[in-house]
């Protein structure tokens, strides 16, 4: 591991610290005098796969054995095979090697050696063991320590939402950086001055992750990771990761994997020929394949297979919809607006409710009865968000068909949000992409218990047909049901019917699917006046009087 002759020459002739970077072939690729800093390793070609170490080791020789915390962290930050500090005066060495747990680098192990032991240390065997442990864990099942992230964006309000996304993904946000330059740098997205500032912030905060509030090009992605020497994630990848964490059904997992693969395909060059960053964390979770080094041909083949599976899902949904007799009412809105809470209020469903973004991923269907006696089906869908990745919109087409097939859309809005109008505009934009803006839409200002009454009054003036409600407390529920009933009633008619006793089975259907206004049993017949759907009235034409 160490060269004895080099050590003797250094002790006799060089009075300052010397740092050497050596590859696995034993070749010295860089020598530098002075304190050991990150500058020694920047720009040196190294392996970037997260199931491999960098292929580099650092030997620093001086008259003492001490290493600062920042110097030790270089071993983790640059994924060094190992770091050795040799003290010639005491004939001792400090060996720092990475520690692996659950498929990722988690900490460092320090070993005190004599120089003779350091020379005889079989570092290649240790590296092989570490890399074997790195690659043996399914990447998307890894439970890793909380990542420390720096957020980069153009405005404070955008960073606030990005902070919410990062927190939902299980990341600890340690700093924020505003990029005021309007023109994007084609190489790094941010300007060179901001890049230097970000490098310093990464080091001072001991961050291992930088998240950009925009989609990066493959080249920008690769260049930023090269310069910052930490993992870089853009907004799209962060949202995909959250979806991966919340995908529980087979359909949801298929859709997430498809979106992830379509995002990764053009970025294979930037990341090396590997499917995803290894070792867990943002960008590695999801129901994708656990074999990570696959080429473009295999990815395209997998994408084709997933699309075929989703086509089958859509066909099955179409068959199920043919059997529906009741109107479909679909809840849409910005993520975390309270759709699931409202769904539970209206249908007594048990939909998961969390104060986090994209808590509900898989669509939920529940049946309920309106005050007018009509049975309807409520559908809760995935929340929308600004700059929603187009890969997700495409992949979740099967789920979003519930929006396209709906008879009525309930646009749930968080009335306590400062960016209320901007978020409403985002939802309308997605609805326009889905081609459903021509449908009847009822705007619901949720969380009314969190805002002042005069503010709600202003909202009602701006949106006259809207309804204010608190899905949490239930206040406004009756007004909302009346509003929904008004819309659904447009498809209902009042009819007079006469049934022979042998056709009495229809009476139950009238009670279940409409509102019976009058019911009389006379000789040989049953006279009924009922408010029912036009579709059901058509089926009962023979009994109308």
Image: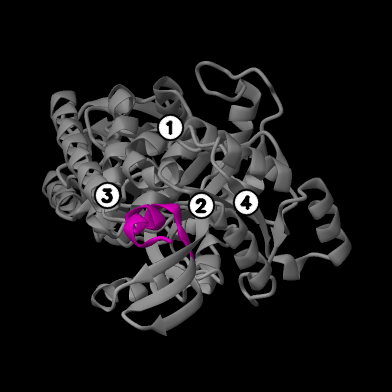
Q: Earlier in the sequence, mark 3 or mark 2?
A: 3
Disc number at residue 442? 4
Pair 1/4: label in front? 4
Q: Which residue is mark 3?
A: 322
Pair 3/2: label in front? 2
Disc number at residue 205? none
Q: Which residues are magenta?
A: 531-545
Helix, strand or loop at disc 3?
Answer: helix
Whole-number angstrom distance, CA of label 3 to CA of label 1: 29 Å
Whole-number angstrom distance, CA of label 2 to CA of label 1: 35 Å
Packing grade of label 1 (10 A; few <14, some 14-19, many >=20) is few
Helix, strand or loop at disc 4?
Answer: strand
- Left or right of 298? Residue 45 is right
Helix, strand or loop at disc 2?
Answer: loop
The reply to whether residue 215 is visible in this rendering is yes
Indicate yes or no whether the magenta region holds residue 371. Answer: no
Question: As rendered, which of 410 and 244 lies closer to the eye?
Answer: 410
Pair 2/4: label in front? 2
Disc number at residue 491? 2
Pair 3/1: label in front? 3
Indicate yes or no whether the magenta region holds residue 532. Answer: yes
All told, the count of numbered labels is 4
Disc number at residue 390? 1
């Amino acid at each position: 591991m160490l060269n004895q002759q080099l050590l003797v020459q250094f002790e006799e002739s060089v009075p300052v610290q010397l740092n050497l970077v050596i590859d696995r072939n034993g070749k010295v690729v860089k020598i530098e005098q002075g304190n050991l800093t990150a500058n020694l390793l920047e720009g040196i070609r190294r392996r970037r796969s997260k199931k491999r170490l960098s292929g580099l080791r650092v030997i620093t020789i001086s008259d003492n054995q001490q290493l600062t915390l920042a110097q030790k962290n270089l071993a983790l930050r640059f994924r060094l095979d190992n770091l050795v500090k040799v003290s010639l005066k005491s004939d001792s060495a400090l060996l720092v090697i990475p520690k692996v747990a659950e498929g990722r680098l988690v900490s460092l192990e320090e070993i005190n050696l004599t120089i003779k032991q350091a020379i005889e240390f079989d570092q290649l065997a240790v590296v092989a063991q570490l890399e074997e442990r790195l690659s043996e864990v399914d990447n998307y099942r890894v439970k890793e320590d909380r990542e420390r992230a720096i957020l980069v964006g153009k405005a404070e309000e955008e960073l606030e939402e990005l902070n919410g996304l990062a927190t939902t993904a299980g990341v600890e946000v340690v700093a924020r950086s505003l990029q005021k330059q309007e023109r994007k740098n084609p190489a790094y997205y941010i300007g060179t001055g901001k890049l230097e500032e970000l490098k310093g912030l990464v080091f001072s905060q001991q961050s291992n992750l930088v998240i950009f509030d925009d989609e990066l090009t493959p080249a920008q992605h690769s260049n930023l990771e090269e310069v910052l020497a930490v993992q870089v994630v853009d907004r799209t990848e962060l949202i995909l990761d959250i979806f991966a964490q919340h995908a529980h059904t087979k359909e949801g997992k298929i859709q997430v994997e498809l979106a992830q693969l379509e995002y990764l395909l053009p970025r294979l060059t930037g990341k090396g020929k590997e499917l995803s960053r290894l070792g867990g964390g943002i960008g590695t979770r999801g129901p994708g394949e656990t074999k990570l080094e696959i080429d473009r041909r295999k990815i395209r083949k997998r994408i084709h297979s997933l699309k075929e599976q989703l086509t089958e899902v859509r066909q099955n949904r179409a068959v199920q919809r043919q059997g529906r007799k009741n109107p479909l009412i679909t809840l849409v809105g910005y993520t975390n607006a309270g759709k699931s809470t409202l769904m539970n209020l209206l249908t007594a469903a048990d939909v998961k409710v969390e104060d986090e973004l994209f808590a509900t991923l898989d669509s939920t269907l529940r049946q309920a009865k309106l005050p007018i006696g009509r049975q309807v089906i409520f559908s809760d869908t995935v929340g929308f968000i600004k700059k929603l990745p187009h890969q997700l919109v495409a992949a979740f087409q099967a789920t979003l068909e519930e929006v396209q097939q709906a008879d009525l859309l309930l646009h749930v809005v968080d009335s306590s949000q400062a960016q209320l109008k901007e978020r409403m505009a985002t939802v309308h934009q997605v609805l326009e992409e889905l081609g459903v803006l021509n449908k009847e839409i009822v705007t619901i200002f949720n969380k009314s218990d969190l805002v002042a009454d005069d503010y709600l009054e202003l909202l009602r003036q701006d949106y006259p047909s809207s309804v204010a409600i608190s899905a949490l407390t239930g206040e406004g529920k009756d007004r909302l049901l009346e509003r929904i009933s008004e819309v659904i009633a447009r498809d209902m008619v009042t009819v007079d019917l006469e049934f022979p006793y042998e056709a009495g089975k229809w009476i139950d259907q009238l009670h279940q699917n409409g509102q019976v206004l009058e019911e009389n049993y006379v000789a040989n017949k049953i006279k009924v006046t009922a408010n029912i759907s036009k579709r059901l009235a058509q089926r009962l034409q023979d009994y109308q009087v």
